[in-house]
Amino acid sequence: MLKPVVLAACAALYLPFSATTAAAGPIQNACLNSDRDAANRSLCSCIQQVADMTLVGSDQRRAAKFFADPDKANETWLSQRASDDAFWDRYKNFGQTAEAYCAG
């Protein structure tokens, strides 16, 4: 009787950590794959946490493309489309929040 309880308790403690480490988000993956000197697992994970708090999944995937192709960010910023303007406002909020939350 005690063995199943101990196994369940161990699983409850282990599973949240294994899910977190196994499932990196699009921003974290893009950050880790970038050629930026400051990119490391801790910083990229922090930035992903902020993305999870401030951007929906489709915005995260779109923003992740900026790591590999900064011209996409410039195109979005210069765009006159209302949807791009709305995305840019959300993206700018994400960037400011990530800088405040993840710096030092």
Image: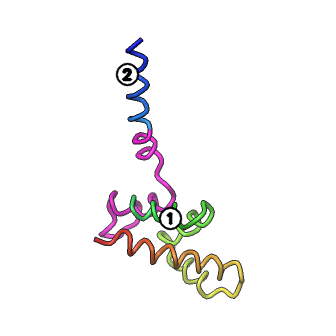
Residue 30 position (above or below residue 93): above
Tag shown at residue 6: 2
Position of residue 48 measured from the top left corner of the image (x, y, whole percent): 45, 61
The structure's colour scheme is rainbow
Q: Which residue is labeled 1 in the image?
A: 51
Position of residue 65 measured from the top left corner of the image (x, y, whole percent): 54, 68
Q: Which residue occupies 54% across, 69% down? A: 63
Provide the residue span drawn in magenta.
16-44
From the viewer's perspective, is 60 left or right of 67? right
> 96 or 76, which lies in front?
96
Q: Which residue occupies 52% across, 79% down? A: 92
Q: Earlier in the sequence, mark 1 or mark 2?
A: 2
Three-letter amino acid code of the residue under disc 2: Val
Residue lying farthest top? Answer: 1
Which of the two marks, 1 or 2, is nearer to us in this view? 2
From the viewer's perspective, is 20 left or right of 54? left
The answer to if 32 sits in the magenta stretch is: yes
Residue lying farthest left? Answer: 104
Q: Residues within 10 Å of mark 2 (few under 14, many from 20)?
A: few
Q: Which residue occupies 71% across, 83% down? A: 81
Q: Which residue occupies 30% across, 69% down? A: 37
Quadrant for the N terminus, please: top left
Residue 89 position (above or below residue 52): below
Residue 62 position (above or below residue 29): below
Position of residue 36 measured from the top left corner of the image (x, y, whole percent): 35, 70
The answer to if 93 sits in the magenta stretch is: no
Three-letter amino acid code of the residue under disc 1: Ala
> 79 or 18, which lies in front?
18
Q: Residues within 10 Å of mark 1 (few under 14, many from 20)?
A: many
The quadrant holding residue 46 is bottom left
From the viewer's perspective, is 6 left or right of 77? left
Position of residue 84 measured from the top left corner of the image (x, y, whole percent): 66, 79
